[in-house]
Structures are given as structure tokens and as C-alpha cells.
Image (tube, rainbow, N blue to C red):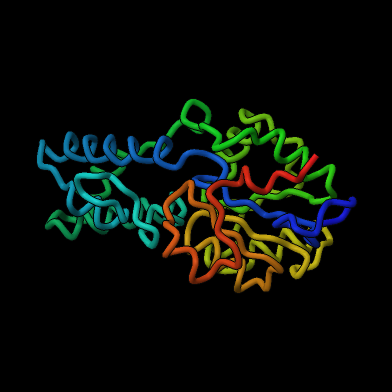
């Protein structure tokens, strides 16, 4: 790490850290588990009381009963627009006509509140400011859309510390495609080999690996467990809090 930090720090030699958002910077379950339950309730209400919970849980990649989001499931790293299409297709798969499926999903669809439900996994302003002092620039690459992402970063008090943001509706191919990493590196003028990609899902890590990132870091605060992340990550940490440079 530049700026005189110890070479033993996880980000030693890194000039740019690209973070995922949900599950990496903020609590994934708080943001999304309740959303899945409410979506199922709204679909049932729009479908004359007939519940399609099993189909919805399957297409979203959520365990029935526990509500746990599966590391390789749809909800782990799929943009909202694509999820909506998948849910419509699932409703059609339940035997409803396409037009009726679209009506039901249109009536049920909603987005989680990006401010009220955004609970940081650690003191993010201190982390990002510490990285900046240590010579590490910060960016975010997320499968969420730009408007809620910008609202979340502003609410968390880190918008001014994040130099570039790549979102699902920006036009880049989605994770695990590496284009978002390449775009951020090109925009900020930092080579991929001096960049770390940090995330909680296999798709985050696969994106970093495909981009040729110098370091790929998995975190255990989101959907991926150690076994799911270790296969692709150079390093797995309990939380991004462990990336705070020494004072």
C-alpha cells in the first residue's frame, strides 16, 4: 500500500479498492429478506390469494423457511430489471397467461427503501477515509440501480469518498462480466493489477478474477459462506472492517 503503510496489510500494493454494495458495505438480509416476504404477499394478493412462494423463492434463490439467500441464486447478484423478468416468467410457469402474469407482478413489484434499510457493516466513513489517507482510492460496483445506490451512499456519509460508481442500469454487462471493473479502472486511470475487488458473492469475485484484478477479497457479511468464496478469492475476511489501514 502506498503512503507508507505496512506491507503486511491486506491491501498492500493496491491503489484502488472496488467494493460491492449489498452484503459487503451494508447488511444484505435487512435490505432484502423482508422484501422477498413482502413481494410474496403482494403477489398472492394480486393473484386472488393464491400463493406462489415456492416458485418465487426458487427464482430468487432464497431458501423456503429460513429466508437465507443462496450464494449463486438470483437475488445474490442480479439487477432488479432482470429479476422482474424472471419473476414474471415464474408466474407464467405457474400456469397463468403472460398478460395476467405481467399484471400480477406489476401490482406486486416494489423496491426496498435504500435509506431506511441501509445498515452499514462497519464505520464506513472511517474505513474509506483511512484508505484514502493510505493512498487507496475507493469505487463501488453494484448490481443495484444508480438512483438507490446514490441515495444509499449519501445516507451512509461516503458519497464524497467514492470516486466512481458502476450500477446495473449504466449499460455495462452485469456481474460476473468484468466490464464494470475495466470501466472503473479506465475512468480512474488505475491498472487492474493494482486494483482490489471486494465482495460477498461468488459473482463479485468472479468479476474481479475475470478482470485481472491484482487482489480479489471475499467478505463473510453477505450471501457467500467461506466455502463458496474461498474457491475464487485470494483472501476471505469476516468484514471490510479488517481492511482499515493501521493509524
Residue 103 placement (x, y as % from top left):
25, 44
Residue shown at the point (63%, 51%) measured from the top left: 19
Residue shown at the point (46%, 30%) measured from the top left: 117
Residue 12 placement (x, y as % from top left):
77, 59
Residue 128 placement (x, y as % from top left):
73, 40
Looking at the picture, tell me which residue is in the foreground, 124 or 89: 124
Residue shown at the point (17%, 38%) measured from the top left: 44
Quadrant housing residue 216:
bottom right
Task: List the single residue furthest toward the top.
Answer: 116
Residue 145 placement (x, y as % from top left):
54, 46
Image: 27 above or below 186: above
Task: List the single residue furthest toward the right.
Answer: 4
Image: 107 above or below 242: above
Looking at the picture, tell me which residue is in the foreground, 13 or 39: 13
Q: How many marks?
A: 0
Q: Is residue 203 left or right of residue 108?
A: right
User: The N terminus lies in which quarter of the figure?
Assistant: bottom right
Quadrant housing residue 206:
bottom right
User: The C terminus lies in which quarter of the figure?
Assistant: top right
Q: Is residue 112 left or right of residue 125?
A: left
Quadrant housing residue 95:
bottom left
Q: Is residue 80 left or right of residue 99?
A: right
Residue shown at the point (11%, 37%) measured from the top left: 48
Looking at the picture, tell me which residue is in the foreground, 76 or 173: 76
Amino acid at each position: 500500500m502506498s503512503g507508507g503503510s505496512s506491507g503486511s496489510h491486506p491491501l498492500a500494493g493496491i491503489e484502488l479498492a472496488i467494493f460491492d454494495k449489498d452484503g459487503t458495505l451494508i447488511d444484505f438480509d435487512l435490505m432484502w429478506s423482508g422484501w422477498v416476504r413482502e413481494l410474496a404477499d403482494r403477489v398472492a394478493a394480486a393473484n386472488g390469494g393464491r400463493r406462489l412462494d415456492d416458485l418465487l423463492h426458487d427464482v430468487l434463490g432464497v431458501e423456503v423457511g429460513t429466508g437465507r439467500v443462496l450464494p449463486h441464486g438470483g437475488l445474490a447478484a442480479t439487477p432488479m430489471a432482470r429479476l422482474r423478468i424472471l419473476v414474471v416468467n415464474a408466474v407464467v410457469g405457474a400456469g397463468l397467461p403472460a398478460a395476467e402474469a405481467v399484471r400480477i407482478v406489476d401490482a406486486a413489484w416494489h423496491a426496498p427503501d435504500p435509506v431506511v434499510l441501509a445498515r452499514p457493516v462497519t464505520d464506513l466513513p472511517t474505513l474509506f477515509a483511512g484508505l484514502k489517507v493510505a493512498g487507496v482510492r475507493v469505487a463501488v460496483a453494484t448490481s443495484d440501480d444508480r438512483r438507490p445506490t446514490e441515495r444509499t451512499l449519501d445516507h451512509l456519509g461516503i458519497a464524497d469518498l467514492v470516486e466512481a460508481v458502476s450500477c446495473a442500469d449504466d449499460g455495462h454487462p452485469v456481474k460476473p462480466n468484468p466490464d464494470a471493473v475495466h470501466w472503473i479502472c479506465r475512468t480512474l486511470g488505475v491498472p487492474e493489477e493494482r486494483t482490489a475487488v471486494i465482495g460477498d458473492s461468488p459473482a463479485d469475485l468472479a468479476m474481479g478474477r475475470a478482470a485481472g484484478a491484482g487482489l480479489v477479497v471475499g467478505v463473510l457479511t453477505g450471501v457467500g459462506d467461506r466455502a463458496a468464496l474461498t474457491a475464487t478469492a485470494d483472501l476471505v475476511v469476516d468484514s471490510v472492517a479488517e481492511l482499515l489501514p493501521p493509524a
